[in-house]
Image (cartoon, rainbow, N blue to C red):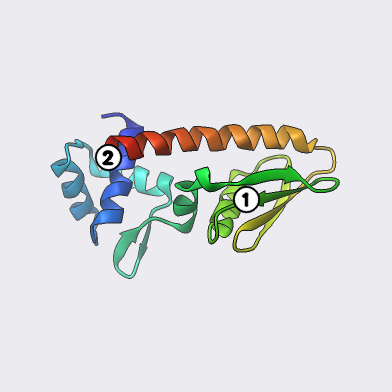
């Protein structure tokens, strides 16, 4: 099983079951056919931003937002080095946090509401270059999401 498939399975287990320890998670993965070690599991948890909240493992707000990047409805320049991104209601904070975590050289910062993100770019960065870069990343994430959804049906 490759890394992407294993990580998708990991997220699926966490979303569907109450998991309170890595031992339980490892057992759940093994029952679903994923042969992995505790060390690999720990790395996957870190990479995916999985958090332990209320005594159980959960997907972070960022991961939840990324799983819905197909819901990004618009990404357009406003004026100067500012962009507006429209998302489905409730996802803007998670997507903005993800953008901030990527430390894109073009991005100075983001401000998020419920479904809208204001992205401030460096004045020297052409907005169209960043739009192209971020759109490419979103399309890669969306195709992964579509594959994981179709394989689970």
- Answer left or right for 24 relative to 49: left
Dot in front, 2 or 1: 2
Q: CA distance from mark 2 to mark 1?
A: 31 Å
> Secondary structure beneath disc 1?
helix
**Residue in the foreground of this view, choosing between 133 and 38:** 133
- Answer left or right for 47 relative to 104: left
Residue linked to disc 2? 152
Residue closest to the far top: 2
Q: Which numbered tag is attached to residue 61?
A: none
Residue 119, image x, y percentages: 71, 50
Q: Quadrant of residue 136?
A: top right
Q: Residue at x 40, y 48 (%)?
A: 46
Q: How many marks?
A: 2
Q: Residue at x 29, y 48 (%)?
A: 12
Local crowd size for mark 1, using a 10 Å CA cut-off: few (<14), some (14–19), many (≥20): some
> Secondary structure beneath disc 2?
helix
**Residue in the foreground of this view, choosing between 47 and 137:** 137
Q: Which numbered tag is attached to residue 100?
A: 1
Q: Nearer the N terminus, badge 2 or badge 1?
A: 1
Q: Quadrant of residue 30?
A: top left
Residue 143, image x, y percentages: 45, 33
Name above or below for residue 91 compared with residue 79. Answer: below
Residue 40, image x, y percentages: 30, 40
Residue closest to the far left: 31
Q: Quadrant of residue 33?
A: top left
- Answer left or right for 79 relative to 135: right
Q: Quadrant location of the C terminus?
A: top left
Q: Residue at x 19, y 35 (%)?
A: 35
């Amino acid at each position: 099983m490759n890394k992407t498939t294993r990580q998708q399975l990991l997220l699926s287990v966490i979303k569907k079951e109450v998991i309170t320890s890595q031992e339980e998670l490892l057992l759940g993965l093994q029952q679903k056919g994923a042969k992995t070690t505790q060390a690999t599991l720990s790395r996957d948890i870190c990479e995916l931003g999985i958090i332990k909240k209320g005594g159980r493992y959960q997907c972070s707000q960022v991961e939840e937002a990324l799983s819905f990047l197909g819901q990004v409805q618009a990404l357009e320049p406003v004026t100067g080095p500012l962009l507006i991104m429209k998302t489905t209601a409730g996802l803007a904070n998670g997507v903005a946090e993800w953008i901030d975590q990527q430390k894109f050289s073009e991005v100075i910062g983001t401000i998020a509401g419920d479904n809208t993100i204001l992205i401030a770019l460096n004045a020297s960065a052409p907005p169209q270059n960043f739009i192209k870069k971020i759109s490419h990343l979103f399309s890669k994430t969306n195709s992964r999401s579509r594959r994981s959804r179709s394989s689970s049906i």
